[in-house]
Amino acid sequence: MSFLADAATMFGRAPRRPTSFSEEAEILHGRKRRAHVTKLLEDARARPPRTTWRNRRWAVLIGVNLLFTISFWLDIQIVEGSLTASRFLGFHLADVYSSLLVILAQRHVAVNLVIGSVTVMILWAVVGGRAYCSWVCPYHLVAELAEKLHLRLAERGIVQDHVFHRGVRTVLWFGFAALALVTASTLFLTLNPIGILSRAVVYGASLALLWVGFLLLFEVVYSRRAWCRYICPIGLTYGVIGAGAPVKVVYHLERCAHEGDCRKVCEVPHVLELTIKGRAEDAEVDIGPDCTRCGMCVDICPTDSLKYEIKGLRDLL
Ligand code: SF4
Ligand code: SF4
């Protein structure tokens, strides 16, 4: 898929079926499932589920968030502030979308916010923007736990997932920005569960946690991962920033059994539609910029068709 097609998919367009295929992909699509892929599939079904990347990710996410707390309580000033705006060893760091809203609302460009945002943009442009979501964002962690509960209840027919158009997130991105510019209000920052949780982790609980509880309840009983899938402009911003990042999850058609386990665990399953038989236009395809690099598909894929790769440094990971 081209860069523009990937971007359009991230902004809300449904993934398109490819109109042409590489020669290698055409041969692979035409083949019946080979014996070694069937064997890999059987072996994977017989072993306990892997959680390697999830464990690493949770350790990093909890570690990053606790660093704020430890630094504050021990007054050692390694990191000061919260995920919305902070200083790491004296260097300014600022969430890019939150900074944009503050600048629009105040109609004033604060130098510290610009320095902090540019530093953060450079970091996530290299690592892969939406890795912020799954490796740092505290809401991701609690939403993952709520999602498990949603899936259990859905399995028993107690709740149902209600799907919205993903384009809503793009509309809200512009909506919150326009609101900040016109009314000088940073409404999104009040509603933002990342800021609420990050401040709670550092400074202690507040009534605002009730709002986070309401969001989680909504996701459990009505719409799976609704905030991250359809609302959060921060996730979209980091998706754009990291669109060309060298750290990717890469799909290998040759190994794929097309059983679709990966799409069932993915927060953004539209990026994995290429794993459906007949959809990948090449033998190896990079997963699109909306991918959070969470590694759930890497862990669950029974035939190791999805792998982390650093472009230009193959097999390092
Ligand atoms: S989409 Fe937003 S709330 Fe969800 S994980 Fe990403 S930054 Fe956090
Ligand atoms: S494609 Fe894989 S790594 Fe990316 S968000 Fe989905 S499950 Fe996570």
Image: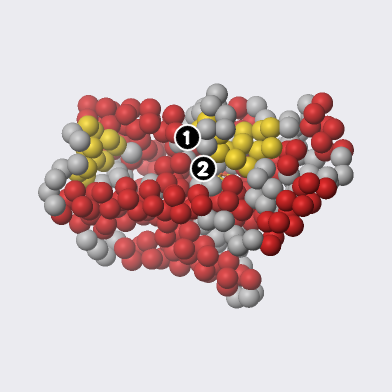
Instruction: State the residue at coordinates (65%, 27%).
Output: 2
Give the quadrant of the N terminus.
top right
Q: Secondary structure at mark 2?
A: loop
Tell which of 36 and 129 is nearer to you: 36
Give the residue at the far left of this rendering: 75
Mark 1 sits on what residue?
A: 128
Contact between marks 1 and 2 (CB within 8 A): the answer is yes
Q: Secondary structure at mark 1?
A: loop
Residue type beneath disc 1: Gly
Toward which corner of the image does residue 208 lie, by quadrant?
bottom left
Image vertical order of residue 252 relative to residue 268, above or below: above
Distance, label 1 to label 2, CA atoms, is 8 Å
Residue 146 percent across, percent down from the top left = 48, 64
Mark 2 sits on what residue?
A: 293
Tell which of 31 and 316 is nearer to you: 316
Image vertical order of residue 146 relative to residue 118, above or below: below
Whether residue 130 sits left or right of residue 27 in the image: it is left
Coloration of the structure image: secondary structure
Return the mark for residue 49.
Answer: none
Within 10 Å of the Cα at label 2, are there few (<14), some (14-19), or many (20+) other Cα atoms?
Answer: many
Whether the residue carrying mark 1 lies under 8 Å from ligand 2 is answered with no
Residue type beneath disc 2: Arg
Residue 44 percent across, percent down from the top left = 68, 56
Whether the residue carrying mark 2 lies under 8 Å from ligand 2 is answered with yes
| Residue 11 visible within the image | no
Whether residue 148 sits left or right of residue 109 in the image: it is right
Image vertical order of residue 155 relative to residue 190, above or below: below
Residue 169 percent across, percent down from the top left = 51, 45
